[in-house]
Image: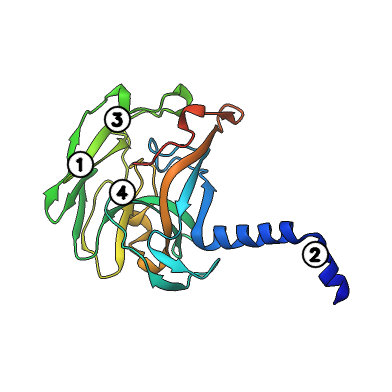
């Protein structure tokens, strides 16, 4: 016991720092590198996103156990969740809320029978800045009510997921999609997301490394707010 006490006293600040970091990443906030392009052009491969783990729930660190609800997920939120169906952590945009009817016809989104609006088709300003990050397809703005975000579709690609539903979302479940609509395995593939699987709200990009250019920093994306 004396030896353990001596080790603690000699390394008190380091042990306290590690303990704080453990609690911080487990229950308050976390950061995740993104390996895929399913959320392009909003999130690119090599982006490291910041996750607010207190956005919706107070959870026991590194568990799925919620101690209290702190807020409710909203349409347009980019959420981090642990998918039981996919057996992995995923990052997608929340599109449909409990009680709503969702349908997709040829990549056009309908919520309760009302179509989303699409504007600024093929606007170069919506594309990623670097040529290596761009993909063949159309970049556009999708608007549902007052919420607007950029997405990407590939008109020449016969995506079997471009038609879906209609489906009514039950209580405490959500419909999510990737912004890269023709290159995203989301609720169209894995099904609805139970609220118990949601871990947090991705709010900004901490840093970004271009995986296609020997991990060259994309300094223009550092600390960018996710919309």
Q: Residue furthest right?
A: 3
Circle 4: element type: loop
Task: Give the mark nearer the N terminus: 4 vs 3.
Answer: 3
Report the Cα–Cα distance between label 2 and label 4.
59 Å
* Residue highlighted by disc 2: 9
Circle 4 or circle 3, nearest the eye: 3
Q: Is residue 178 left or right of residue 166?
A: right
Report the Cα–Cα distance between label 1 and label 3.
16 Å
Q: Are marks 4 and 1 in contact (CB under 8 Å)?
A: no
Vertical comparison of 206 with 210: above or below: below
Task: Give the mark nearer the N terminus: 1 vs 3.
Answer: 3
Task: Give the mark nearer the N terminus: 2 vs 4.
Answer: 2
Residue 138, labelled with which disc? 3
Report the Cα–Cα distance between label 3 and label 2.
60 Å
* Residue highlighted by disc 4: 161
Image quadrant of residue 166? bottom left
Q: Nearer the viewer, residue 203 or 10?
A: 10
């Amino acid at each position: 016991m004396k030896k353990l006490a001596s080790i603690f006293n000699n390394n008190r600040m380091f042990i306290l720092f590690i303990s704080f970091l453990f609690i911080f990443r487990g229950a308050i906030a976390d950061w995740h590198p993104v390996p895929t392009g399913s959320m392009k052009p909003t999130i690119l491969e090599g982006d490291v996103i910041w996750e607010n783990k207190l956005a919706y729930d107070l959870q026991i660190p590194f568990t799925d156990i919620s101690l209290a609800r702190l807020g409710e997920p909203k349409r347009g939120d980019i959420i981090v969740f642990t998918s039981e169906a996919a057996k992995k952590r995923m990052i997608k945009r929340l599109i449909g809320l409990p009680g709503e009817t969702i349908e997709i016809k040829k990549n056009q989104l309908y919520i309760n029978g009302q179509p989303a609006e699409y504007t600024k088709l093929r606007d170069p300003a919506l594309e990623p800045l670097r040529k290596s990050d761009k993909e063949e397809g159309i970049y556009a703005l999708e608007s549902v009510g007052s919420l607007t975000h950029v997405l990407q579709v590939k008109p020449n690609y016969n995506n079997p997921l471009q038609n879906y539903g209609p489906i009514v979302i039950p209580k405490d479940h959500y419909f999510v999609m990737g912004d890269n609509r023709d290159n995203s395995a989301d609720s169209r593939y894995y099904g609805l997301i139970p609220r118990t699987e949601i871990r947090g709200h991705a709010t900004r990009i901490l840093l970004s490394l271009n995986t296609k250019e020997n991990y060259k920093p994309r300094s223009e994306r550092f600390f960018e707010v996710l919309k």
